[in-house]
Amino acid sequence: QKEVEQNSGPLSVPEGAIASLNCTYSDRGSQSFFWYRQYSGKSPELIMFIYSNGDKEDGRFTAQLNKASQYVSLLIRDSQPSDSATYLCAVRNNQGGKLIFGQGTELSVKP
Amino acid sequence: DAGITQSPRHKVTETGTPVTLRCHQTENHRYMYWYRQDPGHGLRLIHYSYGVKDTDKGEVSDGYSVSRSKTEDFLLTLESATSSQTSVYFCAISASASYNEQFFGPGTRLTVL
């Protein structure tokens, strides 16, 4: 089992819809969770982080964390074509504190 | 890119030659990291630094060495480049190990022929 797992996609949604990206992790002691957006040919850009169970909202983005079920998700409301990118989930490892990245989910928002 | 530069941005080299990649930050962050990104493998940690002259290995450190003589610079060296080291290399920085929010540089695309 990989430490951090994401569906690779591509996930295709129509413009204006809600995109839902999911991530599961294996280290039950993990404390910090991050979502990065990566456009093709560019570097990862931090868009959300969450440390506590529940929801965290920032504009059109909502991160959801459920430590009991060991999953973290990212919702993008009113999806725009400019949201088309690969979204990377990262989890701070409880052993040594390093970030472990999932392989990313490719999102395509169709006009 | 949060005050992080990488040089060179692109490099083509031949098998067996040494290669050094440089990461420079202006944020005065304590922690610096080198990752490689390959299709099917995502981002994998090569080495990291938790202070000047303090470094440690990541999950894919074989064939790589690092040095950090100043807070702002973190060098990654491929002692004898191999074709399997063809990849995109990203540097990242973080101010805190507690939560470890990392910010990435623009990347270096390295091709080993």
Image (cartoon, coloured by chain):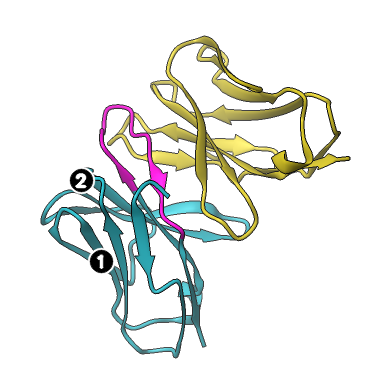
Chain colours: A yellow, B cyan
Q: Chain of mark 1?
A: B
Q: Amino acid at mark 2?
A: Asn
Q: Chain of mark 2?
A: B
In this view, B59 is above or below A5:
below
Q: Is residue A65 left or right of residue B4?
A: right
Sequence-wise, the earlier of marks 1 and 2 is: 2
**Image point (61%, 30%), residue name:** A23
Q: Quadrant of residue B25?
A: bottom left
In the image, is residue B104 part of the stretch drawn in magenta? yes
Could you tell me if residue A62 is visible in this image? no
- Which x, y percent locates residue A50? 47, 20
In-front residue for pair A105/B70 = B70
Q: Label 1, label 2: how many angstroms apart (C-alpha)?
A: 16 Å
The residue identified by callout 2 is B28
The nearer-to-camera label among 1 and 2 is: 2
- Which x, y percent locates residue A91? 45, 32
In the image, is residue B102 part of the stretch drawn in magenta? yes
Q: Which residues are magenta?
A: B93-106
**Image point (33%, 67%), residue name:** B62
In-front residue for pair A66/B68 = B68
The residue identified by callout 1 is B75
Q: Secondary structure at mark 1?
A: strand
- Which x, y percent locates residue A12? 83, 39
**Image point (78%, 41%), residue name:** A81
**Image point (88%, 40%), residue name:** A111
Q: Residues within 10 Å of mark 2 (few under 14, many from 20)?
A: few
The lab-note entry on whether marks 1 and 2 share a chain reads yes
